[in-house]
Image (cartoon, rainbow, N blue to C red):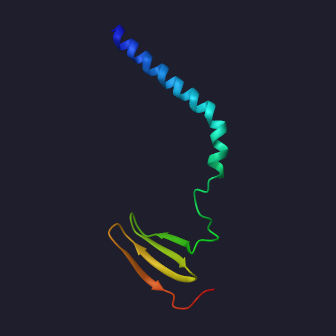
Amino acid sequence: MTELFLSLLRVLVALGIVIVLILLTLPYLLPLFQKLKWTRDDRDSRVRLRKVIPLGRSMFLMELEIKGRLFVVAMTEGAVEVLYKDEADNS
């Protein structure tokens, strides 16, 4: 019983040390993480999601704008099908 208690105590002390180290380094690392650009801006993206219409449990209609052209896409679990493709430029 005491051996189990000592091993549990060692794990808890190690976990406490790790948590303290994370809390000490977080104020220094957080500004660095905030400077990184994790996602692209929507403004310079060529693909824009305009509307999503759920039709069922796993069926959706999506309206996409890709390089100024409009696409209506049906998505299910097993397939993706283009239902409408705008032939003229919307720009």
**Residue 86 image offset from top left, x and y in percent:** 51, 87
Of residue 73 and residue 58, the one placed in the foreground of this image is 73
57 left or right, relative to 53 = left
Residue 45 vs 15, above or below: the answer is: below
Q: Residue at x 53, y 78 (%)?
A: 66
Q: Count the marks: how many? A: 0
Q: Quadrant of the N terminus?
A: top left
Which residue reaches farthest bottom? Answer: 88
Q: Residue at x 57, y 75 (%)?
A: 46
Q: Residue at x 51, y 91 (%)?
A: 87
Q: Quadrant of the C terminus?
A: bottom right
**Residue 45 image offset from top left, x and y in percent:** 59, 71
**Residue 17 image offset from top left, x and y in percent:** 53, 24
Dividing the picture into quadrants, the one containing residue 44 is bottom right
Of residue 81 and residue 2, the one placed in the foreground of this image is 2
Dividing the picture into quadrants, the one containing residue 10 is top left
Of residue 44 and residue 74, the one placed in the foreground of this image is 44
Which residue reaches farthest top? Answer: 2
Q: Residue at x 56, y 80 (%)?
A: 67
**Residue 61 image offset from top left, x and y in percent:** 46, 73
